[in-house]
């Protein structure tokens, strides 16, 4: 049983600051996560957490709890679908390797502030320049964003089988890039060796020609012998 005064670590995995009201007169500001993997942490009492839950702080996935306590806390807060709350890592995986359930969760987001988390992950992946995001997934993100901007809460996007064609996993992309780089280096080395070999053969040919010229027999001076027959 969680007590009102119990201190609970609240985690921010976002790479931006997150501010939350914890009482009518007090708010906390979470510093950004440095890399999206290691969260910034503020210990909060359950009373403060309960007040913050009046907003979309936890339902929207802006802040999280430690794994060993999250189930109890979410249930105490009355958040029944907490296992469906997307964290940043899950959003990245959906964008890179789309599944029906994953894309459905994204297009079913009804809060524009929550959808900004998806767009932030999307733009970060694009900026990294090493990720393969399908054109259809990009269209889905753009279309749903426009719908929310136009106050269209329920999406008209229909997820189809063709939307689920998985892009090459990021690890495979990196592996292919490494293999391609190694092949390019091998080709460069082979080309260099061929150039050296051709240069050596050319030098050897020139030397042989020079020797032929210097060892050619000299003609005897005088008139040629008459034929006595």
Image (cartoon, rainbow, N blue to C red):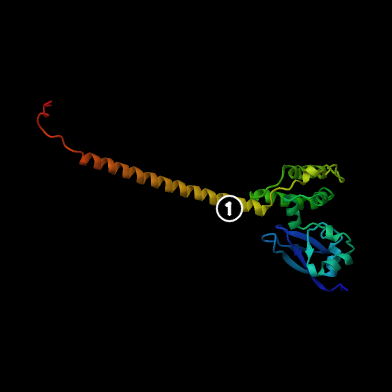
Residue displayed at 36% across by 44% down: 199
Quadrant the N terminus occupies: bottom right
The image quadrant that residue 61 belongs to is: bottom right
Residue displayed at 60% across by 50% down: 177
Residue at the limit of the structure toward the left, as seen here: 222
Residue displayed at 68% across by 47% down: 132
Position of residue 208 in the picture relative to residue 194 (left or right): left
Looking at the picture, how far across and down is residue 54, in whole percent? 87, 60
Secondary structure beneath disc 1? helix
Looking at the picture, how far across and down is residue 223, in whole percent? 10, 29
Circle 1 Cα neighbour tier, 10 Å, few/some/many (<14 / 14–19 / ≥20): few
Which residue does the numbered mark 1 point to in the structure image? 178
**Residue 100 visible to an observer of this rendering:** yes
Looking at the picture, how far across and down is residue 193, in whole percent? 43, 48
**Residue 44 visible to an observer of this rendering:** no
Q: Is residue 226 above or below residue 145?
A: above
Q: How many marks?
A: 1
The image quadrant that residue 19 belongs to is: bottom right
Looking at the picture, how far across and down is residue 211, in whole percent? 24, 43
Judge by depth and name the residue closer to the eye, 72 or 96: 96
Residue at the limit of the structure toward the front, as seen here: 229
Judge by depth and name the residue closer to the eye, 5 or 112: 112
Quadrant the C terminus occupies: top left
The image quadrant that residue 213 belongs to is: top left
């Amino acid at each position: 049983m969680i007590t009102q005064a119990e201190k609970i670590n609240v985690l921010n995995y976002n790479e931006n600051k997150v501010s939350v009201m914890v009482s009518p007169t007090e708010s906390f500001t979470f510093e950004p996560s440095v890399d999206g993997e290691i969260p910034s942490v503020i210990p909060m009492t359950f009373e403060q957490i309960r007040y913050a839950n009046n907003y979309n702080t936890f339902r929207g996935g802006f802040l999280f709890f430690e794994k060993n306590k999250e189930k109890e806390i979410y249930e105490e807060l009355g958040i029944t679908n907490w296992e469906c709350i997307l964290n940043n890592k899950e959003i990245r995986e959906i964008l890179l390797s789309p599944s029906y359930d994953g894309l459905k969760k994204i297009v079913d987001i009804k809060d524009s502030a929550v959808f900004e988390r998806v767009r932030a992950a999307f733009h970060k992946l694009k900026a990294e320049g090493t990720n393969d995001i399908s054109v259809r997934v990009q269209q889905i993100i753009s279309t749903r964003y426009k719908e929310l901007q136009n106050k269209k809460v329920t999406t008209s996007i229909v997820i189809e089988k063709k939307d689920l064609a998985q892009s090459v996993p990021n690890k495979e992309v990196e592996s292919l890039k490494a293999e391609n780089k190694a092949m390019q280096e091998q080709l460069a080395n082979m080309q260099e060796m061929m150039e050296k070999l051709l240069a050596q053969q050319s030098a050897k040919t020139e030397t042989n020609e020079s020797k032929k010229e210097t060892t050619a027999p000299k003609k005897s001076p005088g008139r040629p012998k008459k034929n006595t027959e």
